[in-house]
Image (spheres, rainbow, N blue to C red):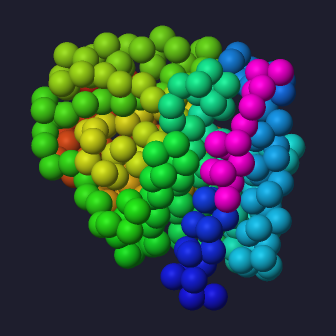
Amino acid sequence: MDAEKLTAGIEAAARRAGAIMLSASDIERKTSEKEGHGNFVTEYDKKIQAFLFDALREVLPEANFLGEEDGAGNFREEYRKGYLFVIDPIDGTANFLSGFRPSVTSIALLKDGEPYIGVVYDPYDDLMFTAQRGKGAFRNGERIHSLERDLAHSLVDFGTAPYYPELQDLTFALARRYMNLAMDIRHAGTAAWDLCLMAQGSIGIFYELKLEVWDFAAGALIAEEAGCRVTDAAGLPLTYDRKTSVMAASAGVAREGCYLPADVLGINVKN
């Protein structure tokens, strides 16, 4: 199928998923805990993912599916060929549970193991971020571009990797160091959204030291297509078959260099 038609179909499904998110009520009572500190799932995560699986099968029947809430979090060898939808129904579940905005729906379509289309939708502000490989990044249909300023004149946004306590010291050591190098520090609570902030030129660096593929696959493509440099924390290309660190730098910060953990702390972070 043509990439434009695929993207339109994915956008339509994301909007309908967003309507489910906006309809949520009595969220706390409909919430349970998963393994790991601060790791929650609501009935709406499950409801939205089930809806998206059904809706996206109509868009691309031959595709496989990998979703956060389906209990099949392992990347299978068969996913390396053909099409694979990678879905986070509500990225920012803790935000969703707490009434802290935003929470987003993230949908990536991988082709032969690599990102092909990315869609991230924030229903609260009706913001739709999209990208197709090699065709640029867009917000509500308007082309967006990475920030051109240097680090000293940019914000740094980071994820806390809350499910991995062994990474807390390093995560916050980086934040403390970047605090001295950048304008200020931010934490939004959703990696997909953070990467879209990179794409629209709001921040100069985003990092998180361990993420699942559904957390970053769509946002990473959107950020890359906007002109950001997106790698793991060691500066190596992202992998889409396992958990990984994610490090994104705006065009301006990447051009300046000296922003990776090995640069600012003298530590080469390995996945």
The secondary structure that dominates the magenta segment is helix
In the rendered view, does 12 fall on the left or right side of 137? right
Q: Is residue 22 magenta?
A: yes
Viewer can see residue 157 = yes
Q: Is residue 171 above or below residue 80?
A: above
Viewer can see residue 209 = no
Q: Is residue 40 above or below residue 111?
A: above
In the rendered view, does 110 fall on the left or right side of 259? right
The N terminus - image quarter: bottom right
Front-most of 152 and 7? 7
Specify the farthest residue to the bottom. Answer: 1
The C terminus - image quarter: top right
Residue at x-position 24% and y-position 22%: 184
Residue at x-position 46% and y-position 64%: 130
User: Could you tell me residue 93's position as x and y percent?
Assistant: 66, 32
Q: Is residue 119 above or below residue 267?
A: below
In the rendered view, does 56 fall on the left or right side of 204? right
Residue at x-position 51% and y-position 82%: 4
Q: Is residue 139 above or below residue 135?
A: above
Give the magenta range.
Answer: 16-29
Front-most of 174 and 44? 44
Specify the farthest residue to the right. Answer: 71
Residue at x-position 51% and y-position 31%: 101
